[in-house]
Each structure stands twice: as C-alpha cells, then as structure tokens.
C-alpha cells in the first residue's frame, strides 16, 4: 500500500507538487502522467526517501521499496551480473542467504524475464539504452519489493520490448501483490498495466480515475492528453 | 524606493557581501559534509564493516598506479635541493652536512608533502570525478534505494586504501629522494658518495620518521575523505562534476598544507 496525503514540495520557491493526495492498494498499479517537468519523478523520489517532502504524509507497506530510474542509473563500474545482484551481495542480511551459484541462477532468471540473455559479462556502456533499462528493471526487483516505483519503464523501448515489460509489471503485481506506481507517457502502458491514473499539471492533480474513465469521460485535460492535442487547458510554455 | 533598491543591489559593496555570503555558506556546508561523512565512515571502519576485496582494488589504485609520479616528484625535489646547496656547502667546508640536510628535509617535509600533492592530483581528482559522476547519473541514488549506505560502499574502501597506502608510498618516494640527492650532490660538487651517505645517517632520526609516518596516515585519510565527499555532494551535470573535482583538489591541497603546519607546531616546537 502507498498512501500519500497533501504532499507539497518546493524547489527554490517553485512549487512543483502542490497538495497531491492518492492511494495505491496492494496489488494495484497507479499510472502517473503529465508534462515533462510536472513533478512525476519528484513524487517517486519522495516516496522512496531520496527527497524530503516539505509537508504532507507518505505511508508505504513494510519491506523494500524498489525504483526503476528514468535513466537506468546502472553502476558503470560493475558488469550486468554484478549490477543485478548488487543488493543481494552488499546487504548484510541478504548476503548470507545466497551462494555464488544461487546468485548466478538469479541473474539468469531475471535476465530471461526481461528478455535478455548472455549479457551477464557486459558492462552498461556496452549495452543499448533499452537494454540498460531492462537490466535496471531486473536489478530493482531482485529483492522482492513490496512497493515498486517505475519511472518511465518503457520509454525508449521498441513496441515489443515495451509489451514484454508491461506484461511483466502486471505479472509481478499479481505474483507479489506489491503496490506499484508507473510514470509513463505511453497510452499503451497505461492501458496494459494501470488500475488507476493520476494526471498532474502545474503541480496540481487534474484527474484521478480508471484508465477507462480517462479515455471515455475524463475532462478537458485528459481529452487533450489522450488526443495529444495542442489546443486545450494545458499549455507547453508555462513559466 | 524600488529604483534605489535596484541601484543598491548593483552596487559593488552589495555584490561583495553577496559573494562573501555565498562563499561562506559553501565553505561551511562543505566542511560540515566532510565532517559528517568522515564520522559515519569511521563508524563503519571501527566496527569492521569493510569490503576487503574493494579495499585491495582501491589500494592498487592509490599505491601502485601513483608510484611512478610520486617517486619522480619527490626525487626531483630532493635533487633540486641537493644541487642548490651541495656546491656552496662544500666550498664553505660544510660538505659533511649535505646529506644530513637533504635527508632531514626529505623526511620531515618534502617527502610527505610532495607525495601528498602527487596523490591529490592523480588519485584525489579521479576519486572526486568518479563519485561525482555517480551522483549526477543517479547511481548514488540507486545505491541508496537498493538499501546500501553509499558511505559504506564508496567511502570506506577508498578511505582505508588511502590511509594504508600513503605511508609506503611516502617511504619509497623519500628513499628515492635521498638517493637522488646523493647522485646530484656528487655530480655538482667534489663530494663523495661515502661522505654523503654517512652524513645522511646522522640526519635520519627515528623520531622524525615516526612523525612522517603519522603524517602519511593522516594525509592519506584526509585526501581520500575530502575527495570522496566533494564528489558525493556534486550537483548538476558535467559542469557539476568539474566543479566537484576542482573543489576536491583545492580543499585537499589546503588541508594538507594546514595539517603540515599543525604537525610542525605540535611535534617540532
Ligand atoms: N534537485 C532539484 N533541484 C531543483 N529543482 C528540481 C530538482 N529536481 C527537480 N526539479 C524541478 O522540479 C520539476 C519537476 O521535475 P521532475 O523531474 O519531477 O519532472 P518529471 O515530471 O519527472 O519530468 P520528465 O517527464 O521530464 O521526467 C522540474 O521543473 C525541475 O526543474
Ligand atoms: Mg522524470
């Protein structure tokens, strides 16, 4: 479960998040959509503790919080194998649980899940952007987290890899019953993975509802988003 | 009123105060960060939460890869000193003191301080830019989210390596320096090797060597800590990495010279 109430965050006098509230139950996925710079990544970073909120309350279930970073953030001094098992090797309470063979098996299994094989010994700089994204996906879920945050998990992927990741987000949710948030710009990702949608504009929440409501009823904001129209209440050039 | 305010804001005094304020704030935050990270790294070190494999890798970086440059810089300093004084001292009948002077100067000051400078420019800068790059590409955020303390993962092995490798580097470099001074002295004056080295022995004091080793431990620790911290608090993109690297080098240089002053006052006066 993720529960966010009256979240406010300001960067140097610019209010990026202005009174945001939402709730994601276990086994549910929330999609957050909105313009570039509307504070989507900031919400995720506040939930996983990388940024401090100015005010508001954030509650998550006990257990690990995983995050798939927008730009992968793979460790470039480690190869794919070591990237994936980073948490298992570096965390004291997890280190004792696995032998080297276990770890190899985990890596192989996770890589297969994200549709990669035989890249264990490669370094991040030797992979394409989309492959890096998938490795970072594998790295994030290795500790069986109870809360999963995806920052644009399918951006920069070809449609087939996107579908693979989307299916996996759904499968993971069903298997682990985790609460997840997906930040995305893609309608396909919303439709395949999300149970709810939250739309941000200028620091405010302008829509909250199911993907179906978003497409069928919605309001002028969602209509503009769905049709990707230039005319509507949202203006690209907000200062 | 508004116009006056705008005018005053452009005035040199206002701008100077602004610069001072920003500078002081930056100084205090950096100093605070270095202290806090240093303390939390010490906490891990004292409870032996150490990844020895990583320590070994970082030690190779500190000790082995920097050695050629460190040796060259320290040796050249000693050679320059010997060349400058040997001729004149032999002429004035002080030939017996050339070795003593070179040895004492190298052990007390130039050996350690020049090694420090070499390590700062080679290793300190690379530590800072490495960690700053990890910061601006969110790799440090990723470490945190994966439940690992970046101070334990990044700082501890580098600080241990810096602390442990600095003394051997300094000792090797200083030895080369004293030998180099001998070669230089015999080349520029009538001094014999034998005379030089017997006077070297009279200039080597156990006490000085102990202080030099204590300095080496301290400087190694300081350089690694400052460089890691400056990288860790980097902000922004490529420019931030550049700023962090410069900061690490400048802060380390000043810290080393300052500590050297403290050591000199504490142990030789
Ligand atoms: N550390 C920071 N310091 C100052 N301002 C920041 C910081 N992080 C984000 N911002 C500002 O907060 C706003 C929201 O940023 P955020 O990264 O959350 O946007 P986003 O919705 O994820 O955009 P995108 O779709 O491009 O990823 C931006 O205007 C950005 O300039
Ligand atoms: Mg973002």
Image (cartoon, coloured by chain):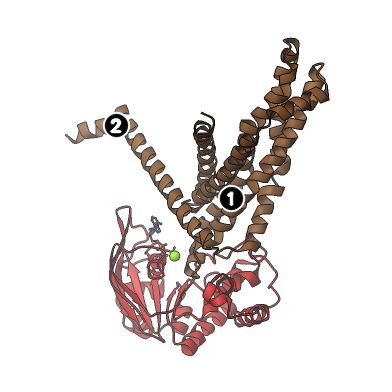
SS label for mark 1: helix
SS at mark 2? helix
Residue at the far bottom in the pictured view: A175
Mark 2 C-beta closer than 8 Å to ligand 1 = no
Q: Quadrant of the N terminus of chain B?
A: top left
Q: Locate residue A180: give its quadrant.
A: bottom left
Residue B127, label in figure: 1
x then y, percent, for residue B74: 69, 33
In the current view of this chain or complex, which residue is farthest to the left? B1
> Are the residues flagged by discs 2 and 1 from a single subunit?
yes
- Residue nearest the viewer, comparing B256 with A4: B256
Q: Nearer the N terminus, badge 2 or badge 1?
A: 2
How dense is the environment of label 2, judged by Cα within 10 Å: few (below 14), some, or many (20 and up)?
few
Does residue B137 show up? no
Q: Position of residue B226 (x, y in %)?
A: 51, 46
The foreground one among A101 and B264 is B264
Above or below — where is A187 with respect to B144? Answer: below
Label 1 neighbour load within 10 Å: few <14, some 14-19, many 20+: many
Query: Which residue corresponds to mark 2?
Result: B14
Q: Which chain identifier belongs to the red chain?
A: A
Q: Position of residue A53 (x, y in %)?
A: 32, 64
Q: Which hue is chain B drawn in?
A: brown
B264 horizontally vs B181: left or right: left
Image position of B97 with respect to A133: above or below: above
Q: In x, y percent, where is residue A239?
A: 33, 54
At 58% from the left and 81% from the top, the residue drawn is A97
Q: Can see residue B245?
A: yes
Quick one: which residue is furthest to the top in this view? B92
């Amino acid at each position: 479960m993720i529960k966010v109430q009256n979240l406010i965050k300001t960067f140097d006098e610019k209010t990026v998040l202005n009174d945001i509230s939402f709730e994601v139950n276990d086994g549910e996925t929330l999609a957050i959509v909105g313009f570039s710079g509307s504070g989507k990544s900031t919400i995720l970073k506040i939930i996983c503790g990388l940024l401090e909120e100015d005010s508001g309350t954030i509650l998550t279930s006990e257990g690990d919080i995983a995050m798939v970073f927008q730009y992968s953030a793979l460790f470039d001094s480690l190869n794919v194998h070591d990237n994936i098992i980073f948490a298992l090797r570096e965390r004291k309470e997890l280190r004792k649980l696995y032998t080297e063979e276990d770890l190899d098996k985990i890596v192989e299994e996770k890589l297969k899940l994200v549709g990669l094989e035989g890249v264990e010994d490669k370094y991040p700089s030797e992979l394409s952007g989309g492959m890096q994204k998938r490795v970072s996906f594998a790295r994030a879920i290795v500790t069986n987290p109870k809360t999963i945050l995806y920052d644009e998990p399918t951006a920069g992927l070809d449609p087939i890899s996107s579908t693979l990741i989307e299916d996996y987000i759904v499968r993971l949710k069903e298997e682990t019953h985790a609460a997840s948030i997906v930040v995305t710009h893609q309608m396909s990702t919303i439709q395949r993975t999300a149970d709810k949608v939250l739309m941000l504009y200028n620091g405010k929440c302008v829509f909250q509802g199911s993907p179906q409501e978003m497409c069928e009823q919605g309001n002028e904001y969602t209509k503009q988003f769905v049709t990707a129209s230039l005319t509507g209440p949202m203006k690209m050039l907000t200062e | 009123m508004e116009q006056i305010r705008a005018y005053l804001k452009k005035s040199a005094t206002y701008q100077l105060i602004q610069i001072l304020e920003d500078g002081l704030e930056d100084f205090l935050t950096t100093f605070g960060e270095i202290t806090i990270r240093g303390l939390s790294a010490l906490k891990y070190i004292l409870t032996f939460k150490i990844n020895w494999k990583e320590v070994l890798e970082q030690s190779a970086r500190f000790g082995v890869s920097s050695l050629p440059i460190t040796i060259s810089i320290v040796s050249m300093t000693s050679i320059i000193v010997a060349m400058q004084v040997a001729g004149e001292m032999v002429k004035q009948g002080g030939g017996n003191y050339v070795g003593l002077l070179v040895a004492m100067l190298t052990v007390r000051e130039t050996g350690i301080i020049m090694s420090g400078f070499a390590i700062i420019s080679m290793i300190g800068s690379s530590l800072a830019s490495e960690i700053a790059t990890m910061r601006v590409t969110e790799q440090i955020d990723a470490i945190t989210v994966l439940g690992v303390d970046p101070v334990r993962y990044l700082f501890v092995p580098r600080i241990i390596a810096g602390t442990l490798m600095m003394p051997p580097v300094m000792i090797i470099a200083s030895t080369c320096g004293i030998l180099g001074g001998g070669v230089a002295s015999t080349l520029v004056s009538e001094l014999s090797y034998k005379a030089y080295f017997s006077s070297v022995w009279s200039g080597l004091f156990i006490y000085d060597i102990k202080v030099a080793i204590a300095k080496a431990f301290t400087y190694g620790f300081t350089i690694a800590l400052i460089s890691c911290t400056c990288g860790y608090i980097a902000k922004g993109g490529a420019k931030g990495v550049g700023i962090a690297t410069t900061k690490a080098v400048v802060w380390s240089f000043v810290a080393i010279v300052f500590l050297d002053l403290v050591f000199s006052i504490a142990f030789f006066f």
